[in-house]
Image (cartoon, coloured by chain):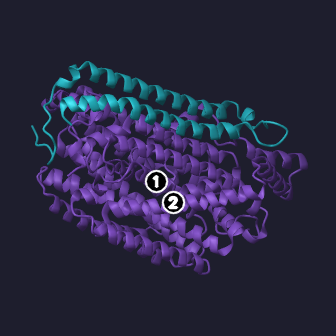
Amino acid sequence: MSRWPVTRTALILAALGWPAIAVADALTGQTEQQAANWPAILMFAAFVLATLGITRWAARRVRSASDFYTAGGGITGFQNGLAIAGDYMSAASFLGISAQIFADGYDGLIYSTGFLVGWPILLFLLAERLRNLGRYTFADVASFRFAQTPVRLFAAFSTLAVVLFYLIAQMVGAGQLIKLLFGLPYSYAVLIVGALMTCYVLFGGMIATTWVQIIKAVMLLGCASFMAFAVLWSFGFSPEALFAKAVEIKTGLAAAGGAAPGEAAAKGLSIMGPGGFIKDPLSAISFGMALMFGTAGLPHILMRFFTVPDAKEARKSVLWATGWIGYFYILTFIIGFGAITFVASNPDYLMPDGTLKGGGNMAAIHLAAAIGGDLFLGVVSAVAFATILAVVAGLTLSGASAVSHDIYASIVKRGEANSADELRVSRMTVPVLAILAILLGIAFEKQNVAFMVSLAFALAASGNFPVLVMSLLWRGCTTRGVVVGGFAGVALALVLTILSPQRYGKPYSVIRTRHSPIARRRSFRCLAAFLAIWLVSLADGSGRAAVDRAGYPAQRVRAETGIGAAGASAH
Amino acid sequence: MEKRREGEPTETPGPQPIEADERYRRLVAGRSRFAWTLTCVMLAIYFGYILLIAFEPEMLARPLGSGVTSLGIPLGIGVILAGILLTAVYVRRANKVFDRDLDALRKDYGA
């Protein structure tokens, strides 16, 4: 544990809901600037040129607010599935989970399963309803039968809060990663990320953002497939041979560390079974719940369901996304064990004290160098960085649409704004968000990134998710219930996260105990918002409440059938 | 009542005519039962796995044969594959059965 605090933090926080974290966390560790890595810089430059080309192509297609927010609803299920998978397969899951497996073996697989099972459930209960009811933002769905102003105000507030915290974390993460991988100074990285994401979103809207995400997903899947293939190939495609070699190396390391032979053998073999990660059933269940609630509250993920033309394509996109993500997790498992066999005992990649050069989360990066030399190392580094770019673009877009669609068009203009004005407001918001993200990214350079991400997650899971579920599935839900419960959930998440010990810990000694009560608190928080929505709605006897409840049948019919929703994408 | 958003069809609140249609009721009830069944299966598989880790970690660490590959590895990967499989089961049934019924309803009630 003490040797891998960074990884541990990364993954515990990843456990809080979302894999995009670990990048950030990778980066809370020691990140001394490395020598300039030219293959990586050239590869990355090629990626940037390609994505700017796509942005140019997309810019000619962005004519209306609908094109800007949702690519005109013209993304296919397959493309959207790749884009969702791209959002999910961040540098975090790639670097973080393979590093977790590198450190502890089997435990990494437990995270992967948790991340995956949220998707089928999202499909069974939410995906088609989201597509049938929503148009541009998840607030369209949450406010469908409620008073527009208060519910949209809540949704916009909570979206912007999630987006901002998440953006800062990604900016700081990008800065650290660039310093580490490319040998460029921190502030360059933050400026590059800020400038590129402004370009993608401002000119290319959702069309460019989606294609950047798709390209990145394909690159990441390609790299990971190649690495896993190379690892398996060197063991004659026998997983047993790979695992046996990994156990042998871990045993050797334990023996070298002074363990008695029997003890060393037990330690080596321990990577093949669950470690101390989950102990009691209560923390086990809350851990599982936390993973599932996490994803379904993130505004930039929810927005992806509006980019497809209908519920059928929404459904297909989840199938593709789940397939790619599952495949990817199986690859990371092989990559993690491959890293043990190629990297763990190779002095080229180790510091004198036996820890990995560049920090615990570099296992996959070193493995890339071990199997493909400097050129492949460059490719993998560039892909890791491209991942961050794609995620920040999506975040910025969802923040901009909260301002222009939820606040400007729906609240200020009472739903009477024309598409051109709405588009103009979105585009004005993009540079504002980018400048804010750059300034905060520089100001927060030393801040604990993992903390910022966990805060963003906590907000999404305790505000957006309960509001969405209750308004969709419960007839008795009212405007007052949603607004009070949603704000209460968000406030509770803010207060509890800020009061939590990790806020004050050193950046990478954040979580001392593995099964800290954080995961438990998190699901409790989420349940608190559900409870508040339920109680307040029950007690709500206002005239508006009667309208809200009377609106349920119409909402339900549209959610179930999509009748009336056709105009949502075809205009 | 507050104004709806631009482009929003004006739905009349209260009971919807389509709700009285037997085909609609059958579709919604059937789909909901199917979705919740799959949800329960997924949760049972996942929490079964997690509780096994909590209560019987030694069992998962036990090698399958004479080598080092443990029972936990096929089980863990099995959970991932089960998630993909259940998703595919839902999509297949929705494409074949639910969509067909829905199209008939859409024709009668105007999409």
Q: Quadrant of the N terminus of chain B?
A: top left
Asked whether the residues under marks 1 and 2 belong to the same chain, the reply is yes
What residue is shown at x 45% (from left), y 57% (from top)?
A452
Q: Nearer the viewer, residue A464 or A341?
A: A341
Residue A182 lies, in percent from the top left, at 56, 76
Q: Is A272 above or below relative to B102?
A: below
Chain of the residue under label 2 = A
What residue is shown at x 28% (from left), y 50% (from top)?
A137
Q: Dot 2 surroundings within 10 Å: few (below 14), some, or many (20 or more)?
A: some
Q: Is A182 above or below relative to A136?
A: below
User: Which of the labelled discs sits on residue A466, or is there none?
Assistant: none
| Kind of residue sitting beneath label 1 | Leu
Any idea which chain is the purple one in this picture? A
Which residue is labeled 1 in the image?
A82
Q: Is A187 above or below relative to A162?
A: below
Q: Give left or right: position of A375 versus A475.
A: right
Q: Nearer the viewer, residue A529 or A346?
A: A346
Q: Nearer the viewer, residue A497 or A349?
A: A349
What residue is shown at x 81% (from left), y 56% (from top)?
A249
Q: Earlier in the sequence, mark 1 or mark 2?
A: 1
Which residue is labeled 2 in the image?
A218
What residue is shown at x 39% (from left), y 68% (from top)?
A440
Residue A528 lies, in percent from the top left, at 39, 35
Tag 1 near tag 2, CB within 8 Å? yes
Any idea which chain is the cyan one in this picture? B
Is label 1 in a helix, a strand or a loop? helix
Q: Dot 1 surroundings within 10 Å: few (below 14), some, or many (20 or more)?
A: many
Q: Quadrant of the C terminus of chain B?
A: top left
Counting every numbered tag in the picture gives: 2
Q: Is residue A3 visible?
A: yes
